[in-house]
Amino acid sequence: MAEVVHTPRVFSGIQPSGGLTLGNYLGAMKRFVTTQDAGDMETIYCMVDQHAITVWQDPDKLRHATRELCAGFIAAGIDPEKSILFNQSQVPEHAQLGWIFNCVARMGWMQRMTQWKDKAGKNTQNASLGLFAYPALMAADILIYHATHVPVGEDQKQHVELTRDIAIKFNNDYGVDFFPVTEPVIEGAATRVMSLRDGSKKMSKSDPSDMSRINLTDSADDIAKKIRKAKTDPEPLPDTVEGLADRPEARNLVNIYAGLADLTPEQVIADHAGQQFGTFKPSLADLAVAKLEPISAEMSRLMQDPAEIDRILARGAERARTIATPILKRTYQIVGMVGA
Ligand code: AMP
Ligand code: TRP
């Protein structure tokens, strides 16, 4: 069996299931932009609306959130000419390959997923079948482009590993070397941005407390207020990063500072050692406002022309399909489907 060498290609997705948070920005989007601008790999970024509906979404809100997410991508620096930017449901090959992967993946693999356990809660019988099968669709998102690199936040590592398992099982079952074994790319200071109210929980768009997160659409005043009120401990900042070990809230604020300023946590500590939070928080708030306000302003500007956003998404879907269609056709041939 000849070893297939796959061209390096980057894919990642974000769910349009509410507003974007600082966690999405630092853990995902900002890194998507860096990868795009490095220019050495093709970059494909997707609004995964079919993932969003694994839990209930009001149709008008879903449409709005998808367009707003697209505006967020562009405002953060994704150039729809340089990258392929689109929404999942406009490229039906994702769902088509997803079905094949539903037949490759095993129930036991899905049952182990921590996101399933968290999102399904106690009453698993009442969760949607889509929520359970979610990681197989995610594998299809990635593998329908033969993507080799997937930049994500820490919380998605398990899903990317499952994508590798699906690719390996498919290749073994059919005796081919067709799908690449994808690498998760999880790097930087802020791959796990935590809640501002509880350093043990990740910052999330679905947290009931708005004070727990910074939204990319928050006003400068809201950003400053949320940082001022963020939970901390009474100690000043330590002299070394090791001194943050048992201080999750303090560590989170240092990581956020590092992510926003493109510094390492070590550099942030070197500059702010011994400071009280009364001093550090206002510096962090100024930095956050300076970095996020231009993005938020650009998002509102783009949202005034939803027709233009829809054109960008349609064009992105067309470009995505030129890659996805032949890969789906070849998959159908491998599986033995007549007519492919
Ligand atoms: P989601 O909003 O769940 O669709 O997540 C989209 C991307 O943002 C994924 O790559 C996540 O890993 C990343 N992400 C979401 N929340 C956080 C967070 N609190 N810290 C770091 N990355 C995050
Ligand atoms: N599961 C991801 C999340 O909840 C979103 C996602 C869907 C994704 N498909 C993907 C991320 C493919 C990377 C690659 O954040």
Image: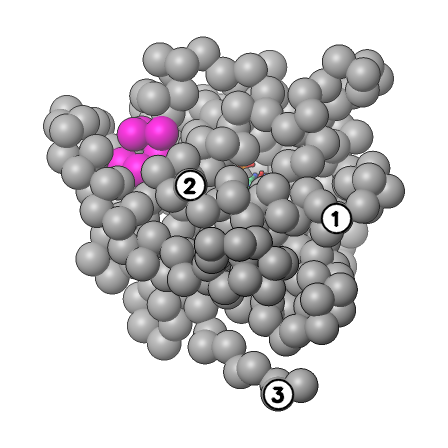
Secondary structure of the residue carrying numbered label 2: loop
Q: Is residue 42 above or below residue 229?
A: below
**Residue wearing tag 1:** 105
Determine the CA span between mark 2 and mark 3: 30 Å
Q: Which residue is disc 2 drawn over?
A: 92
Residue 218 visible in this rendered orientation of the protein: no
Relative depth, front residue between 249 and 218: 218
Question: What residue is at 17 percent from the left and 38 percent from the top?
Answer: 311
Q: Nearer the viewer, residue 291 or 234?
A: 291
Q: Is residue 124 visible?
A: yes
In this picture, is 228 found above or below 251? above
| Mark 1 or 3, nearer chain start | 3
10 Å neighbourhood of mark 2: few (<14), some, or many (≥20)? some
Percent position of residue 325, x then y: 39, 56
Residue at 62% of width from left, 87% of height from top?
2
Crowd band around label 3 with a 10 angstrom C-alpha radius: few (<14), some (14–19), many (20+): few
Q: Which residue is mark 3?
A: 2
Numbered range of the magenta stretch: 66-71
Whether 143 is among the magenta residues is: no
Q: Nearer the viewer, mark 1 or mark 3?
A: 3
Q: Label 3: state its secondary structure.
A: loop
Given residues 147 and 71, the one toward you in this image is 147
Q: Residue furthest bottom?
A: 2
What amino acid does circle 1 point to?
Answer: Ala
Taking the spot 56% from the left edge, 82% from the top edge, the residue there is 4
